[in-house]
Image (cartoon, rainbow, N blue to C red):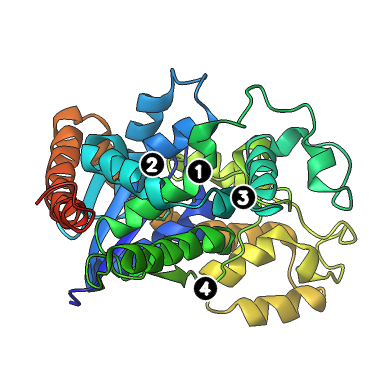
């Protein structure tokens, strides 16, 4: 067990699916055994892009907690909390805002790209044009709320705060978050230079997950706006049906037609779940493996994991008291760690003696 600290968060935007699991959560599961981890539900970050539609915010946060627990995140091994339960974050965010050059945030095209990226993620099913159309064109007119707001401009400062407040050494994130972690590192250097200190913050490093590509059932990126997901909370029978309906190579019309596994969603999943995937690939190419048999095998391979998700979910889902207790404990630990750093920051900035 390392004493080094890990911080990561997710915006609570709805149900998590297997893309989120293989892309991020599974990595968190191994980290919780090796490091001191803080994993949090970034409800304030969710507000930066959805400040009008907030009626689902609290429910989404709870749903995400249940998803995390059902995936195997263990509150005995890591601290799980809700961002807004730690007011020290908002306080440090204010202080760091004082020294963040506007240019870093406005720097074009990064900020505009981010706006467009987030809109594209949010409205993935409604984008105009095709992949060759510039993103700015594809998202035009889609936003139901204007995210040219102060809060969204400050998104990277808040994210830097999340990380720096716990002196995290590593931040497990997707590659799309690189620029954000970079701003956190730049802020550490700037803070040190301005206030002549060295040890208040730690320069965090991004920890990229080894890319596990999980396509949606239809072969597009798995995303809830495409309605092509297998969710973490999926019951077995609906999951089986979804697997049996996955897209396969359209050139394979009969069970013994040869096909190209590269054009097959089922094969992409075999790569994750089947140690014999290379053999299945050869059999498929040779026309020796029919799609129905191939899908049945995949379901059998996935069933134990899906069952484990469901079993854990059942123990938490109806136990609100336990969910609250987990968040309470997580917030207490996060506040203790955050308060220490905040104290050092205020001293360095001469806000307190
Ligand atoms: N910006 C991250 C995302 O959209 C979520 C996030 C907020 C985060 N604060 C963080 C991730 C701190 C890692 C560390 O995915």
Quarter of the figure with residue 171? bottom left
Q: Which residue is mark 3?
A: 243
Query: Of 59 and 250, which appears nearest the observer?
Result: 59
CB under 8 Å between discs 1 and 3: no
Label 1 crowd (10 A; few <14 / some 14-19 / many >=20): some
Residue 217 appears in the rendering: no
CB under 8 Å between discs 2 and 4: no
Marked residue nearer the N-terminal end (1 or 4): 4
Q: Secondary structure at mark 4?
A: loop
Question: Where is 92 relative to 259, above or below?
Answer: above
Q: Which mark is residue 42?
A: 2
Marked residue nearer the N-terminal end (1 or 2): 2
Quarter of the figure with residue 272? bottom right
Horizontal side of residue 70 vs 131, given as left or right: left
Q: Which mark is residue 344?
A: none
Q: Is mark 2 within 8 Å of ligand 1?
A: yes
Q: Which mark is residue 231?
A: 1
Label 3 crowd (10 A; few <14 / some 14-19 / many >=20): many
């Amino acid at each position: 067990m390392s004493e080094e600290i890990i911080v990561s968060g997710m915006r609570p935007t709805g149900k998590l699916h297997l893309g989120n699991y293989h892309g991020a959560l599974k990595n968190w599961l191994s980290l919780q055994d090796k490091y001191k981890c803080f994993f949090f539900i970034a409800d304030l970050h969710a507000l930066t892009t959805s400040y009008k539609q907030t009626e689902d915010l609290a429910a989404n946060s709870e749903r995400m907690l249940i998803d995390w627990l059902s995936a195997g995140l263990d509150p005995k091994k890591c601290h799980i909390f809700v961002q807004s339960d730690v007011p020290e974050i908002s306080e440090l965010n204010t202080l760091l805002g004082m020294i963040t050059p506007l240019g870093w945030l406005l720097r074009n095209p990064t900020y505009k790209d981010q706006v467009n990226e987030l809109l594209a993620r949010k409205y993935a099913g409604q984008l105009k044009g095709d992949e060759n159309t510039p993103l700015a064109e594809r998202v035009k007119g889609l936003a139901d709320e204007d995210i040219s707001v102060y809060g969204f401009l400050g998104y990277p400062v808040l994210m830097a705060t999340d990380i720096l407040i716990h002196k995290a050494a590593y931040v497990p994130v997707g590659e799309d978050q690189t620029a954000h972690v970079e701003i956190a590192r730049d802020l550490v250097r700037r803070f040190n230079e301005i206030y002549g200190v060295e040890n208040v913050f730690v320069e965090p490093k991004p920890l990229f997950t080894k890319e596990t590509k999980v396509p949606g059932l239809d072969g597009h990126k798995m995303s809830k706006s495409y309605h092509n997901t297998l969710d973490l909370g999926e019951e077995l029978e609906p999951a089986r049906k979804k697997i049996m309906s996955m897209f396969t190579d359209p050139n394979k019309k009969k069970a013994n037609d040869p096909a190209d596994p590269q054009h097959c969603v089922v094969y992409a999943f075999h790569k994750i779940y089947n140690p014999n995937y290379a053999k299945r690939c050869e059999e498929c190419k040779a026309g020796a493996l029919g799609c129905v048999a191939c899908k049945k095998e995949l379901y059998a391979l996935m069933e134990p994991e899906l069952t484990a998700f469901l079993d854990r979910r059942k123990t938490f889902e109806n136990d609100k008291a336990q969910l609250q207790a987990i968040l309470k404990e997580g917030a207490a630990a996060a506040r203790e760690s955050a308060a220490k750093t905040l104290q050092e920051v205020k001293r360095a900035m001469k806000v307190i003696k």
